[in-house]
Image (spheres, helix red, strand yellow):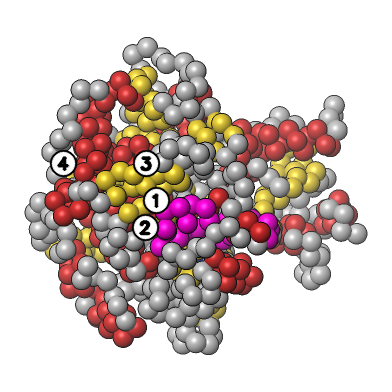
Amino acid sequence: MGNKIQTLSGYIHEYQKSVLQPEEFWSRIADSFYWKQAWSKTLEWDFDGPDVKWFLDGKLNITENILDRHLFTKGDDPAIIWEPNEPGDKHKVISYRELYEMTCQFSNTLVSNGVKKGDRVIIYMPMVPEAAVAMLACARVGAVHSVVFAGFSSTSLADRINDCEAKMVLTSDGNYRGAKQIPVKEVVDEALEKTSSIEKVIVLNRTGDKVDMKEGRDIWWHDAIEGQSKEFKAVEMDSEDMLFILYTSGSTGKPKGVVHTCGGYMVYSYYSFLNVFQYSQGDVYWCTADVGWITGHSYIVYGPLLAGATTLMFEGVPTYPNAGRFWEIVDKYKVNQFYTAPTAIRALQAFGLEPLEPYSLESLKVIGSVGEPINEEAWHWYHDHIGKGNCPLVDTWWQTETGGIMISALAGITPNKPAHASLPLPGIQPVIVDSEGNELHGNNVEGNLCVKFPWPSIIRTTYGDHERCRQTYFSTYKGMYFTGDGAKRDHDGYLRILGRVDDVINVSGHRMGTAEVENAINEHPKVVESAVVGFPHDVKGQGIYAYVICDMEGRTEENLKKEIKDTVRKIIGPIATPDEVQIVPGLPKTRSGKIMRRILRKVASKDISNMGDTSTLLNPEVVEEIIQGAGLK
Ligand code: WT7
């Protein structure tokens, strides 16, 4: 693994090289892969388009680098360890050879069911090895997968299917999530009533629930793979062919399909995995995310498997059957690298130290955090009680759009600092800018976080709407990718992420557009208008607070609040359910009709000092009424 940085001076050296000669730098990393045809040019870019291309004319299939390449050297090594929801149930260990065969067999299945290169396939599945096989099989046949988190509602699923005009859905009969059983196939059936592009649905038998199978459309997974060959010649892909679409929330109501392409994503997911986690052959690595999010794509499936690692996949939740489940799994498989979200840490911290007592956790070498800023208290708890004070804690900052980790310590190589993502990875050139877009040099500066040079896994477009991609990321500051986050470079030169500066909130590490939640609330027939803001929440990081103007006739306030929450749950999914709903007589607006969210954010966080000048509002009296309604006076 010649691409692994081993020392601090090695990091400094590689970083300098990556900035001075980015093309030579990335060419060297890309050279360690198998390409069907070498690239003719390393990089072409223009952030105004935006138009970014890496490894031009290179031909490859990412699965050859995951499967075929490892077949002879590590065919018998474990690729995926799967731990089921129920602790007593049988776990699975899938070797690289088995993963190869399962992927090829499912590739043949996709093709026999009409999937061709470039077709979009939706994956709406539980955390089972077949979900990874589904992703890899799509990649092998050249189809574009779009994984949809199986907690999203039928409406959210239908919107995504329609946006990318998907041809097929891969799903299961039901999902186990802790003590709950979720009727996934039913959700798919409901979604498909609102779509017209889906030709086939392949259904994995997971829970044995009785489901409706629509003649001619729905096929059981086990029937579909029967008799299919376990060999499949990988389809040749161009570096810049689409690998996947992953939908994520933005500041407008409609989720956008972030597009990643084959060559650059392969190189960066691998390189960042290897270096951040300092993976060594034979280690057992575990990321607790769901494959429905980018973390699951880059750091459960692609990054680790490209590196020939053993990646653990867990079907369940941290608190089932008790709050010791994560630690039981760490000991059971002797996990060496453990990667989770601050919200999970805070939730487990609330149970105290008792659930930890039966476990040694001595196998752990590296622990990681992702998804939102990790507060100092959670950082110390994680570091002291899980890492036992001697595991580097990597606080990894990145986004769906960046494809891989951008700012993070390299475990044990570059220094750790609580609540600081710290330093950029080689090849990443972050800048802090003021509101005019001037770069703020030096230490002790705070502003908006941008990146001024492309890296291999940068977002290429938003599916079907390139203009939206330009507008959202490349138009705020000319010549730079704008992240939407605020950041500070502290007196030591370490970067600290301060959170979103746009109308995006981060609930338990899940991204939610305030407009998206408002649109859902407005679907309720009694709702006249609504405004949604985030507020600090002890466990979730941010909670969702909704101010709603309603026609109260025939309803009590309690009923209405519940109905509004149910509406959001139904339209988006449980993760978007507002924590608080406040019925208000009006919303504070400027004379041009813009909602003053600053005021609403202050009330939601129970801080009514410094409300600022409200006299210029169209309706200043409403502020007092909202404060009283919130019980703050
Ligand atoms: C947003 C991206 C990247 C995978 C999970 C979320 C926030 C992410 C950190 C961190 C502070 C973080 C940012 C970012 N975020 N990691 N280590 N420290 N904030 O992916 O859904 O695309 O969300 O999550 O605000 O913009 P995502």
Q: Nearer the viewer, residue 405 or 477?
A: 405
Q: Earlier in the sequence, mark 4 or mark 3?
A: 3
Q: Quick check: marks 2 and 1 in contact, CB under 8 Å?
A: yes
Position in image of residue 388 (x %, y %): 53, 71
Which region is colored magenta?
327-352
- Which residue is label 1 attached to? 312
Distance, label 3 to label 1, CA atoms, is 10 Å
The mark lying in front, picked from 3 and 1, is: 3
The mark lying in front, picked from 2 and 4, is: 2
Q: Within 10 Å of the Cα at label 3, are there few (<14), some (14-19), or many (20+) other Cα atoms? A: some
Asked whether mark 1 lies closer than 8 Å to ligand 1, one says: no
Distance, label 4 to label 3, CA atoms, is 26 Å
- Which residue is label 2 attached to? 284
Drawn side of residue 239 relative to residue 417, left or right? left
Q: For numbered disc 3, what is the local secondary structure?
A: strand
Picture residue at 65% right of the left edge, 42% below the top: 577
Q: Earlier in the sequence, mark 2 or mark 1?
A: 2
Say what amino acid the circle numbered 1 marks. Leu
Residue 343 lies in the magenta-colored region: yes
Position in image of residue 587 (x %, y %): 76, 50
Say what amino acid the circle numbered 4 marks. Ala
- Which residue is label 3 attached to? 92
Q: Earlier in the sequence, mark 3 or mark 1?
A: 3
Q: Earlier in the sequence, mark 2 or mark 4?
A: 4
- Which residue is label 4 attached to? 234
Say what amino acid the circle numbered 2 marks. Val
The quadrant holding residue 274 is bottom left
Distance, label 4 to label 1, CA atoms, is 25 Å
Position in image of residue 616 (x %, y %): 77, 63
